[in-house]
Image (cartoon, rainbow, N blue to C red):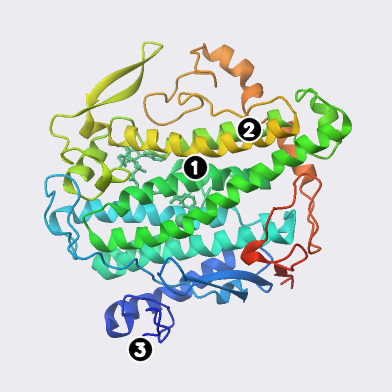
Amino acid sequence: MNDLIGVSYDTLIPNNVDLSSDRRVLKALEKWHPGYINWWNDMGPSGFQESLVYLRTAVSVDPKGWAKFDYVKMPEYRWGVLLAPQAEDRKIPCGEHYGEAAWQEVPGEYRAMLRRLVVIQGDTEPASVEQQRHLGKTAPSLYDMRNLFQVNVEEGRHLWAMVYLLHKYFGADGRDEADDLLRRTSGSEEAPRMLGAFNEATPDWLSFFMFTYFTDRDGKLQLESLAQSGFDPLSRTCRFMLTEEAHHMFVGETGVGRTIQRTCEAMKAAGIDDPYDIDRVRALGVIDLPTIQKKANVHYSLSLDLFGSEISSNAATAFNAGIKGRFQEVRIDDDHQLTTATYPVIEFENGKITTREAPALTAINMRLRDDYVRDASGGLKRWNALIKKTGVEFEVKLPHQGFNREIGTFAGAHVTPDGDVVSADVWQSRRAEWLPTKADGDFIQSLMKPVWEAGQYASWIAPPRIGIDNKPGEFEYVQIHMA
Ligand code: BYC
Ligand code: FE
Ligand code: FE
């Protein structure tokens, strides 16, 4: 029974994949569901499970009308399985099967590779919810608290998206993988999450905004490349996830922007011109710009690690198989097989940073990371325009790609944010200029005081320019009922 907009509510799990006539998968998902709810209650937003949150729920995959806003208790959010509409006659866009019909079932020879990618993607989603679970308690406003919870429930839905694929297409080992996605935990010693950045702490709201700006953007680029997959169900689910992802990056960009705005306004009002006059700036109850830069440095460098090694046979194999494409593969004007093409790859060797042409097929990760760097630089231009408008002289910059890296050619290298190669000793002695220190963290923590009156904002952040769903400034985005 489908309603007008194509999403069916006749099972526990809203969906547009006709679950009600797919008893096997429906049963498997219904069996997985209680474990998910337990995970959400244990590892999801701490302390706010009883609160009413003004959330958007996906009720359609039509780009014009997919969302509905209403007050919801988070554990009652309708996490659904929603795929973008099937494109007619879709072809495999790259690799050795280029131009063949896209797969509707898992091609046997690529089963293991596909499963691995789906599992890695799925693993990051709950990880981010775990990383952010304590932030509600120090929300700088109800507006921000609501945005945090919106991001959290949608990351929960992204987990559902991958779990659906595992149950539907990967049989018994898919079921085991789906269970393991609820077993690993961010930061755990025994069973950590799979990728580096997802085991780091998100200790404060500035980190949350930087994470949604920089790390959710890795999500965007990875989803873009999985949206090019020749395995059509993966492509379709990623295409819909991308519509939600846009909001996460909006939360990050505007969150950092509002923080910067408030700092500059407070400096101007107090007659402070020097952004490095840190004690005086901090005494105003705002976060000094150099510390904001340091936070950007950490989150950007951790996010660059998520692209894997510049030269990768895994990535070449996935591309060649037609399992993972390049960013906007179908718009690229080439043979989509990369039989002879080369691509410039950055390399650290014998203490020097150089660039060399490598076979493009092996440089898929490098290329996606370049696309990411371009995408990530947009927000910095807008942040810097905000600063300039207030008359403060400061520019937020992306550090060099070699700075603070643990994966790829720069792992173990000592590169400054400006891109100079220095000795380990020099790097260590200047570390505190580039990355947040314990004292920086403590200072930020001291500002993280909850503000729970509608329309009020913490000292360190400017109000948003417009409300969510066009709500007025005084709107009560969260009705708090503590558990
Ligand atoms: N940490 O050939 P290599 C998101 C491993 S974020 C730990 O260099 P490959 C989200 C790698 O697994 C998007 N290990 O790399 C954001 C491999 O191990 P094995 C998540 C790492 O495979 C915010 C070995 O090193 N989705 O959605 O080409 C909130 C050599 O690998 C790391 C995806 O990532 C690391 N950083 O590329 C919520 C898409 N980097 O197999 C959600 C799926 C590499 O030798 N994943 N390794 O044991 C992929 O496409 C690829 O696996 C990667 C790595 C891009 C991650
Ligand atoms: Fe996600
Ligand atoms: Fe996200």
Residue indicated by mark 2: 384
Q: Which label is found at residue 197?
A: 1
Q: Secondary structure at mark 3?
A: loop
- Label 1 or label 2, whichever lies nearer to me, is 2
Q: Is the residue marked 3 within 8 Å of ligand 2, measured from its CB?
A: no
Residue 233 in view (yes/no): yes
Q: Amino acid at mark 3?
A: Met
Residue 261 percent location from the top left of the image: 72, 40
Q: Amino acid at mark 2?
A: Asn
* Looking at the image, residue 128 lies above or below residue 80: above
First reached walking from the N terminus: tag 1 or tag 2: 1
Residue 326 percent location from the top left of the image: 29, 43
Quadrant in which the C terminus appears:
bottom right
Check disc 3: other Cα within 10 Å, few if <14, some if 14-19, many if 20+. Answer: few
Check disc 2: other Cα within 10 Å, few if <14, some if 14-19, many if 20+. Answer: some
Q: Residue at x 87, y 28 (%)?
A: 271
Q: Are marks 3 and 1 in contact (CB under 8 Å)?
A: no
Q: Secondary structure at mark 2?
A: helix
Residue 96 percent location from the top left of the image: 12, 45
First reached walking from the N terminus: tag 3 or tag 1: 3
- Label 3 or label 1, whichever lies nearer to me, is 3
Q: Which label is found at residue 1?
A: 3
